[in-house]
Amino acid sequence: MSIKTQLAIIGAGPGGYAAAFYAADLGMQVTLIDMEKNPGGVCLYRGCIPSKALLHVAKLINEAEEADKFGINFGKPEIDINKLREFKNNVVNKLTGGLGQLGKQRKVNYINGKATFLNSNTLSVAKLDGSSETVEFEKAIIATGSIPARIPNLSINSNRVMDSTAALELSDIPERLLVIGGGYIGLELSTVYSALGSKVTVVEMLPGLLPGADRDLVAVLERKLKTKLNIYVETKVTEITEVNDGIKVKLEGKNVTEPEMIFDKVLISIGRKPVTDGFGLENTKVKVNEKGFIVVDKQLRTDDPNIYAIGDVVGNPMLAHKASAEGKVAVEAILGKKSVFEPNAIPAVVFTDPEIAWAGITETEAQSKGIKYEVAKFPWGASGRATTLDRNDGLTKLIIEPETERIIGIGLVGVNAGDLISEGTLAIEMGATVKDLELTIHPHPTLSETMMFAAEVFYGHATDLYRPKRK
Ligand SMILES: Cc1cc2nc3c(=O)[nH]c(=O)nc-3n(C[C@H](O)[C@H](O)[C@H](O)COP(=O)(O)OP(=O)(O)OC[C@H]3O[C@@H](n4cnc5c(N)ncnc54)[C@H](O)[C@@H]3O)c2cc1C
């Protein structure tokens, strides 16, 4: 069979489905192609959503345990892993099924299969039902996303060695789990498995966890994580072999006391790589850079005038909301609008306990690029709301352009930091100054007040903290 479409989108993750729905809302005739039954992509099927469903349960377990301090004892939790897996799967099915419905309501033609470019305006789709379809398009958007990166010499074929997809399947709760990689995916999944009862060891090659986040934020998280996890930084896994009772791992690093350890399972979470192979890019003019990402301009146009690309496949940060925002810009560009993708801030959230979130410029980035900045910090030890939650382990900081007092970056660590960051992102995008934030009346007692308090710290008159401004 052969069809013609105005816009073909390959990949129905947060980039692809957001672009498809938006284009349909703007009156385009859209064909969306993905190998999954419904739209959702990595984020909904094996990323953001299943991980957050499990992290919610981890939080519940941890809070119940910590309630002991308040004189409330719930006892040791009994975990029914089948029921927990069912809960997580139901969340995924509800959301992906919902997206399927939303696509139908918008009359998006959803094809379930694998697309391959034949040339710059034709795709061949190998459908999952075994048939094939040719799709002739005026414009196409590539949104094929990313897959877990592998360490070639450590990748052994064993079901004891998992990537994030396998870890989220939750086939069992290993007694001893090694997580290779202290980035956000590794730490989020460590948090889940540790709450479920695994003894988790995290190994990171670099000197600190969460490269990219400011060290003062990470320090707060690290303190808490160390109460639950064994963490080795500046440590390398040099060899993995399957033995009778698990996986034997050789470690090399300055603080390693046991250079050989055995784990029941190993999770490799060392990053993700863009999906650019195996779907006929060579039959188009699309170019890929030395890091493997598709090259695009600020309108997300590739080197092929008919083809655009968005999401993880075009570069960092590999985040769902970045993919969706790019999708909208690509659609507008295709429709001839002058939109460009030039955000001042893309928020990043690590959903550990406590959460870490940042947006705009980080202090580390400002230092490395020689950008002049001032910092105002409000420690949550002085927050009434944090105290009522017994969670004073938090920090809110503003990164400020000295001459204009404009807020150019926000960093947060603490419970619900992921929700709090949106106010900061808006402040950066709106070009708000510290004064704007200080004069905005925030509700009491909330964690959001810490934004306003940090602004007060900048002027040297925070009500809840005595910290006069340095002259
Ligand atoms: C464990 C984990 C947790 C995460 N948590 C978060 C989080 O909390 N917040 C956040 O913002 N991000 C998170 N991410 C990242 C997020 O999932 C990605 O940034 C996001 O999914 C990227 O969207 P995308 O549209 O670029 O592509 P993807 O979501 O990767 O989707 C690409 C789709 O294209 C399909 N595809 C590929 N090739 C073809 C082809 N030839 N034909 C047809 N279909 C094809 C794939 O099957 C897939 O469905 C997480 C990722 C992981 C792995």
Image (cartoon, helix red, strand yellow):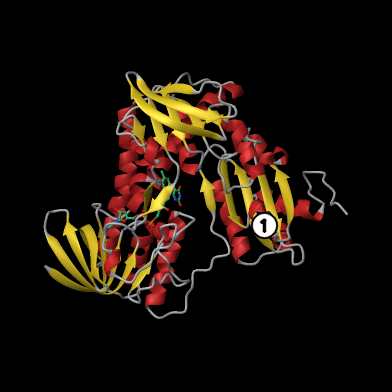
Name the residue that disc number 1 marks.
366
Question: Which residue, as the protein is rendered here, is positioned at the far right?
Answer: 471
Residue 4, picture quadrant: bottom left
Please tell me which residue lies in front, 281 or 442.
Answer: 281
In the image, residue 8 sits, relative to residue 193, either above or below, namely below
In the image, residue 207 sits, relative to residue 459, either above or below, namely above
In the image, residue 305 sits, relative to residue 283, either above or below, namely below
In the image, residue 53 sits, relative to residue 345, either above or below, namely above
Q: Residue at position x 16%, y 71% from top? A: 3
Residue 228, image x, y percentages: 54, 27
Residue 159, picture quadrant: top left
Quadrant where the image shows the N terminus: bottom left
Please tell me which residue lies in front, 168 or 91.
Answer: 168
Q: Residue at position x 47%, y 38% from top? A: 186
Residue 55, image x, y percentages: 45, 37
Q: Residue at position x 28%, y 51% from top? A: 97
Quadrant where the image shows the C terminus: bottom right
Is residue 28 visible to us here? yes
